[in-house]
Amino acid sequence: MTGRRRLGLIAACATLLAAAPLSAIFETWAWLFQSLLAVILIAGAAVAARTLRFPTWAQTVSMVVALALALTWIFPSGKEILIPQPATFTHFADLIRQAGEDTRSYGVPVPDRDGLQFVAVLGIGAVAIVVDLLTAVFRRPALAGLPMLAIYSIPVAVYLDSVPVFPFIIGAIGYLWLLVADNVDRVRRFGRRFTGDGRDVDVWEPSPLASAGRRLGVVGVLVAVLLPLAVPTVSGGLLTRLTQTGSGIGSGPGGTGNGRINLFAALSGQLNQNTTVNIVKVRTNEKEPFYLRFAVADVLNADGVGNTAPRGDSLSEGLPNPATLGSSERATYTEYQAQIEVSDALRQSMLPVYTYPTGVDGIKGNWSYDDGQQVIYSGRSTTGNQKYTINYLRPRYTAAQLRTALPLPENNPLYQQYTAAPEDPVVQKKVDDLIDGEDTDYDKVRAIYDSFSSENGFRYQLSTQNPANASEIAAFLTNKVGYCQQYAAAMTWMVRAAGIPARVAFGFTRGTALDDNTYQITNRNVHAWTEVYLDGFGWVPFDATPAANVQGSARSSWAPDVERPEPEVSASTGAAAPGTESSAAPGRAERPEVANDGATSAIDEGVVPDDGSWTPLFVAAGIALLFALLLVPAFLRVLLRRRRHAATAGGPAPVVTAASGGISDITVTTESTRARQDAHAAWDELLDTMIDFQVPVDPTETPRVTTQRLVKDTLLSGDSATAAGLLGRAEERARYARQPLQGAELSAALRQVRAGLASTATFRTKARASLLPPSVLLSWRLGITDKSARAAEAMARLRDSASRFSPRRLLSRAR
């Protein structure tokens, strides 16, 4: 087997190895067997084409045809007979549209959907063709790593957690195999290798230089991998919060694609939301349920509060009882049950649940519970189209009970983690003034909470402006306008400045009641509030957003509406948890705002309408663009032919008079100059036509000999043969005679010669002359070669100039 065929097979194997990272996306290995069949057909077609010594374009076409056949056999429409039919391509367009819908509906790992598998096989097959051409035809195996890397970029873009490293190692092995095979093939062209003592060795036997190179390569890889692990990095702030944006319901921790929520409570920005989308439906036996809760933000920086990645145990190990955690043993709990149905519009990795869940049934995928953050999360599954049942406990306590909570000692881990805040003199002074004279942690929190009132100038507004030379928190406390996330972040900062643990919670308000125990939640019900840790009671919610701008607000006895203080409710009856609704007035935009980097969170934009109906149009446009690119050589050839034909109708050339030895003057008339130009243009067109129809052109021949050979080799007869002779005489007279041939119908002669060549040529030759004219391709190759030679000459001149430059010579002159 020759080197090119061997390299083609290795390229196919390397492509399959490079596709290993896709195993992180699919649930089963069906896609791999389908891709294996497609790649085998492509490799077989390439080997057959090279065995028959097909040109490069024919090898490419054979591989494309093999891929089309593989896709037809693997994903039939039911109307084929081994080969694709028009209905087949319609079916392919439907599969691509289905794949687009599935990417918005499923989280990884995705099930065996025909659309997704079709796209995977199509992509791997296309990469196999490109890798084969780069390796076996153009002998640039290093560039083959780019399409291989494109496969790896897919799981990197959609995977919720870190992409597994083992599939990447497999793909890297395939790429290295490709490079080694190409290197061995190049060495084998020179024969066998010999050692210094004359002993011949095989190309695979290591040499001292190769061994040293491998050792250096291993050391380099180890340094590249281990050095970043040793360098200290920032563990909080901008690098830990997630501020991805996109279409849908925002962006969440480790989430994929659309339908995620931004977990960053910024202290500045503006809110703009125009679309309402139903995302969650809840049915619960609790009369007045609290907010659904899915995440917390616990990292405070100068711009707001961001989140750290949750960590915990699998749900299969059960959920802890809050009364046994030791931090909330003084609260009274009531057990409830809720059925939650999440629509496809919300696809995030954080599960909406009520506080203190004790059991989750019916959830699909692998989920874990972080008892510190009290959130349920997944590394691979999403909430889209999930329907599950939860059992949960509702804590009950009064303001009088909360006043009994003692401050946490400063060496307590919760105190150290949740009281960390940047220093800001403006905030600290305001907090000190508010809590002055308050004895308990609860009273200090209430003093801060009560300060966010209209009496103190605070009001709800969708956009803010920061005064110059002020921090974000100081600007908010100065302007006193904002929306839910700003209120939550500001209160969290101020509570921490008072030395009390606090964090921001994200979730949904109760939404709209459909009946006594069913609620419809939309994207406008996404909300943020503050949770304060009080010893013995756990994390207690406080919603500082003005209640007048919260639809269906249900404040609690310990955190009442500051505009209308509510009477305390006894511990026996209990108060409903502060079930704040959306943080905007009816009809107004109300959800999480622009992150501090200025990018709008996806919740602000709503859900992008389904654009699946545009997929066939995009496919058709792509096919049309491909055909247009393929027709570029033919288009250029037609333009050149028309320009040469039009040259015979050009304007008159100037009269030029030249002296001839002082004996007589030869006057070059306008007609003779024009005739010479016409003859040269016609001859150039004749040569290009010969090249197009694969008639050899010898530049050493005279025009007469060339036309005679043309007539003889191609069996031209009649008018075609006469026209060829006319073109040869015209060029001969234009070159060597004083007077060129004038008045000849050269354009008509060219058309007759071309018609004669077409009548004797094969269909393949005529098709190639029309669609991929060899004369155009040859001119491109010659142009590239010429430019490369000029560039090489320029580099050589530059190198020679640099070599002549000697610092010693300058120093000697200076002396």
Image (cartoon, rainbow, N blue to C red):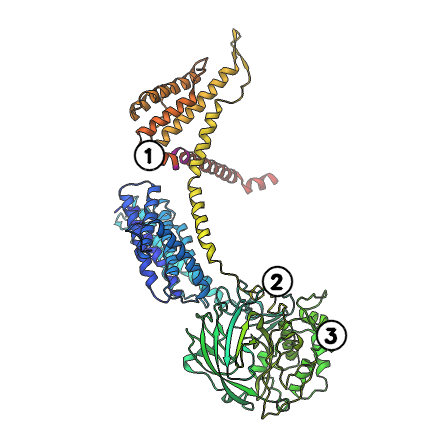
Q: What residue type is labelled 3?
A: Gly
Q: What stretch is highlighted in magenta?
A: 771-777
Taking depth in this image into account, of 779 and 169 the one nearest to the observer is 779
Q: Give the x, y percent position of residue 156.
A: 45, 62
Q: Which of marks 3 and 1 is nearer the N terminus?
A: 3
Q: Earlier in the sequence, mark 1 or mark 2?
A: 2
Do we see residue 54 in this rendering? yes
Taking depth in this image into account, of 780 and 3 the one nearest to the observer is 780
Q: Give the x, y percent position of residue 134.
A: 38, 47
Marks 3 and 2, how far apart at CA: 27 Å
- Report the magenta stretch's main SS: helix
Q: What residue type is labelled 1?
A: Thr
Tag shown at residue 598: 2
Relative horizontal placement of residue 814, taking residue 349 as reference (left or right): right
The residue identified by callout 3 is 457
Taking depth in this image into account, of 274 and 595 the one nearest to the observer is 274
